[in-house]
Structures are given as structure tokens and as C-alpha cells.
Image (cartoon, rainbow, N blue to C red):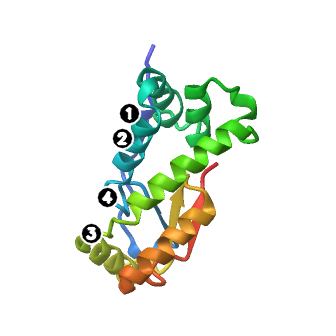
Amino acid sequence: RRSHSKASHIMSVGTAPFVPEKIKAIIFDVDDTVLRGTLAIKHQTFKELFSDHLGKLDEALKLYEATGLGDRRNIIAHIIGEPQESCHQNHRVTTWTEKFNSLCEEQIRKQRLHPDDLDGLIKIKNNFCEELFLLTSTPVEIAKENFAHFEKKQPLMKGLFINIYIIS
């Protein structure tokens, strides 16, 4: 009886050659891909807000962030003991989420896109694919405001990304 894992099957098939003209769009995650250090800012903000509940914070990050099964509202609901099922409509969770968003936004806006990263993104757009998109779990209005802010600080960013997609 032979046993083949999915990975070994993929490896046996091989890798397709890189053909730049076939690329239609490229999607980048914002956190620590386009903007360095944003995950550390978010983790530090959680620690500051919930310094009395670091054990619960650690549990919540493992349950929701590390698995991709939740967002900041799920993490906050877990920490403050609110039900997961209603965390996106829960007033207490919303209040804490707004505090979290405000503190994160303040710190993130102090960042700049690293010059090497900006140069790399421009080269990708110019040489491989004109349609670059962003993927983030940050609420859409905050994400758009942040990128408008960064475009003012670094004019070469203007028009670099076509749209921002939100993971929810």
C-alpha cells in the first residue's frame, strides 16, 4: 500500500516556470509585509490595554490571530469575557475596539514605508504587474485613511495600490 501526501504529490508535479506576462494582479498583506513593524505595534497595544489580563490575551492571540479564525473583536471579546457569537455587535467590545484602533493608528502613522520596500513595490508594479492590491483585517475606513496619510508623507506611494481588501 502506497501513501502519498499532498505535499509529495505537488513536489512530484514540479513548479511552473515564472512567466511575468501572465501575472494579472498581486495582492500584498499590509502587516509586516508592506509596513514593517505593524504587528509588533498591535501586540504592544493589546498588552498596554489589557495589562491585567496578559494570560487571556495570550490565549486569545493563539485562538484567533495565529489561526486566522478571528479578528481584533474576537480577541477583545475573549479577554473581557464577552460571547464570541455577538462580538461584532457588542457595545463593550466596540468600545474597547475603538480604543485599540485609535492607539494603533496613532503609532502606525508614525511609521514610514521602508525605502527599500517602496522601491521594490514600484519595480514590481513597473516590471511585472500594474495591478497591486492590499489585504488587511484593519477596518476599511482606517486602512484607507492610513494609506492616504502615507501617500502624503511619501508621494511615490500615490496610486501604487489599486484597492484595499478587508478580511473579515
Q: Quadrant of residue 71?
A: top right
Q: Which mark is residue 8?
A: 1
Left-right relation of 105 to 144 = left
Towards the viewer: 6 or 133 = 133
Q: Quadrant of residue 95?
A: top right
- Residue at point 59% right, 45% down? 97
Mark 2 or mark 4: name the one nearer the start of the chain: 2
Asked if the residues shown at circle 1 and circle 2 are in contact, with their CB atoms under 8 angstroms apart, the answer is yes
Amino acid under disc 3: His
Mark 2 or mark 3: name the one nearer the start of the chain: 2
- Residue at point 43% right, 18% down? 2
Mark 4 or mark 1: name the one nearer the start of the chain: 1
Q: Secondary structure at mark 4?
A: loop
According to the picture, the residue beneath numbered tag 2 turns out to be 11
Q: CA distance from mark 4 to mark 1?
A: 34 Å
Left-right relation of 118 to 59 = left
Q: Vertically, is 95 above or below 1?
A: below
- Residue at point 53% right, 38% down? 68
Label 3 vs label 1, nearer the camera: 3
Amino acid under disc 4: Arg
* Quarter containing the N terminus: top left
Give the crowd class for mark 1: few <14, some 14-19, many >=20 residues within 10 Å: few
Asked if the residues shown at circle 3 and circle 4 are in contact, with their CB atoms under 8 angstroms apart, the answer is yes
